[in-house]
Image (tube, rainbow, N blue to C red):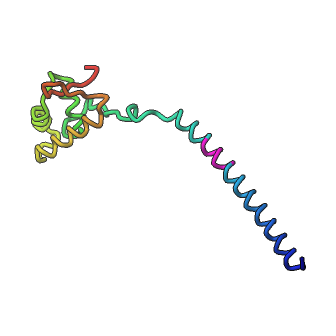
Amino acid sequence: MDAYAMLRLQARAKRDRAIRAARADYAHTLAEISKLSKAIRQKRPTAMELRSVRSGDDRPFSDMTAIEAAERVLLEGEPLRLTELTLEVQARGCRAGDDPRAVAHAIRSAMRYHGNRFTRGKDGRWVVHGA
């Protein structure tokens, strides 16, 4: 074996050691990230806990979002169908100038998103949980 072949073998061995060290370092870093991810996930609130409707107390209906106004209307009275609820929310001043179909869509979407707060009965009437 000549000197050049020997240098090639040494260079290959050095490269292989560097690759093994990089792979070990990468695996160690991934293990640390996994541990941190598990620790963070345990402390994070669930999606349902994050879905809260702001309180609409002491504010005029014109300053509330559609879902806040709908919640207040449902808490004050009896269960309502979506159309009835939309008309009542708009009559009280929340999004009064908007298209009723757009307001109804916003309320329906928000009620489905906040499924832990609102339920629709078999008769199509919406109620607030805990009311």
Q: Is residue 27 above or below residue 58?
A: below
Q: Main secondary structure of the magenta part?
A: helix
Q: How many marks?
A: 0
Residue 64 is situated, as x and y percent measured from the top left of the image, at 24, 38
The one of 88 and 104 positioned closer to us in this rendering: 104
Residue 91 is situated, as x and y percent measured from the top left of the image, at 10, 36
Q: Residue at x 83, y 71 (%)?
A: 9
The one of 76 and 113 positioned closer to us in this rendering: 113
Q: Residue at x 69, y 55 (%)?
A: 23
State left or right for residue 130 relative to residue 17.
left
- Residue bounds of the magenta highlight: 28-34
Picture quadrant of residue 13: bottom right
33 part of magenta stretch: yes
Q: Residue furthest top?
A: 131
Residue 25 is situated, as x and y percent measured from the top left of the image, at 71, 53
The one of 126 and 65 positioned closer to us in this rendering: 126
Residue 3 is situated, as x and y percent measured from the top left of the image, at 90, 79
82 part of magenta stretch: no
Image quarter (top left, top right, bottom left or bottom right) of the C terminus: top left
Picture quadrant of residue 16: bottom right
